[in-house]
Amino acid sequence: MTTLNFDFSGKHVFVAGGSSGINFGIAQAFSKAGARVSLISRSADKVAAAVAQLTSTGAQAWGTSADVRQPAALESAFAQAAEKFGPIDVLISGAAGNFLASVLDMSPNAFKTVIDIDLLGSFHVVRLAHAYLQKPGACVIQISAGQAFIPTPYQAHVCAAKAGIDMLTQVLALEWGAQGIRINSIVPGPIADTEGLKRLAPTDDTLSAMTQRVPLKRLGAIKDIANMSMVLASDLGAFITGTIIPVDGGLALTGPRDFSAAAAASRQEKT
Ligand code: HXC
Ligand code: NAP
């Protein structure tokens, strides 16, 4: 895959939910391009490992354990990050949780848990980050999902949460545009070697069916999402705000997905 030579030297990139998977891949890409990276997630061990991996290449990186459901912890993380690396040039909001369950198999607390992490958590992240964003010039990227606009059985919680996130993106593009802050959502398709995909395609059969469904006939790579993040945050994205951008090999065009086999497989795994 071609790699553009982005230069984010001296820029501060903050990644919420940045200790693994797609979000960590984004952190790595910005770090390789010279950025100073701050990241948070719940697990102190995962954060420490991610920061160690970034700094092992000589990059500047810092992180702390914080749950996006806890505004006080987030506020403290933003204040510490700004103290270390200055105003935030690029904010990635990507903390999320998911599991397959029908509405009738989902307790009110199960539904609420995903809403609290994905939607309310994103609200806390972008709202509390605002004081620390570079104005003008900051770029905010929310990591959404196709469930935001494709009604998907067994995913009612994620559908509701990610739809809310994309609406938040569009409202904030209007509210913050005059301050020179841009905000967009990226909609990853199924991305290989991630926890998210493992939960939606837990067996070889379901993974193969998912791959065949993608018009480009391959799974996405974490790099695909990192590349789009860097395009949006660079001068190439300077006039782009309030958009919802699928990076999914065309999957969003194929309509509602059928997760009943995957749901049955993960139910079987649990028993
Ligand atoms: C039904 C479930 C369930 C399941 C949990 N619950 N798993 N209900 N089916 N498989 C219920 C619990 O019983 C409980 O309800 C409630 O949800 C909260 O569960 P906890 O375990 O207490 O929550 P918590 O510790 O906060 O963990 C959150 C989590 C967990 C979402 C449940 O899986 C997690 O931490 N996930 C983070 C990693 C992750 O999911 N990564 C993938 C992101 S990908 P009760 O009523 O019993 O109290 C993504 C997908 C996008 O977002 C699309 C990809 C294509
Ligand atoms: P992942 O590795 O599980 O990433 C989720 C990250 O969020 C983890 O670092 C996790 O770390 C953190 N997190 C979870 N709950 C949190 C909380 N309450 N507070 C703070 N951090 C929290 O999964 P992924 O598949 O790479 O997903 C990354 C993003 O891409 C998500 O927004 C997901 O919805 C989106 N997405 C993924 C796919 C895919 O194919 N994988 C497709 C579409 C969209 P801790 O456990 O340490 O908290």
Image (tube, rainbow, N blue to C red):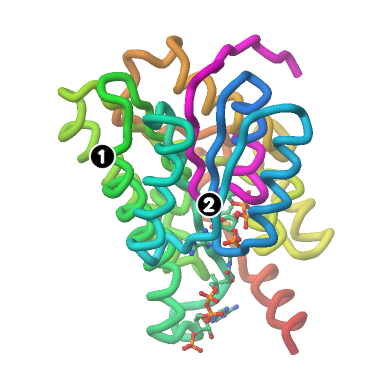
Residue shown at 53% from the left, 52% from the top: 40
Q: Quadrant of residue 65?
A: bottom right
Residue indicated by mark 2: 40
Q: Quadrant of the N terminus?
A: top right
Residue shown at 67% from the left, 55% from the top: 197
- Residue type marked 2: Ile
Residue shown at 39% from the left, 49% from the top: 149
- Residue type marked 1: Ala
User: In this view, which residue lies farthest toward the right?
Assistant: 204
Residue 6 is situated, as x and y percent measured from the top left of the image, at: 59, 13
**Relative side of 78 to 182, left or right:** right
Q: From what the image shows, is residue 231 above or below residue 127?
A: above
Quarter of the rendered image showing ligand 1: bottom right
Q: Is residue 18 magenta?
A: yes
- Dot 2: element: strand
In the image, which residues are magenta?
Answer: 1-26
Residue 136 is situated, as x and y percent measured from the top left of the image, at: 26, 20
Q: Label 2 CB, ligand 2: below 8 Å?
A: yes
The numbered dot on residue 131 is 1
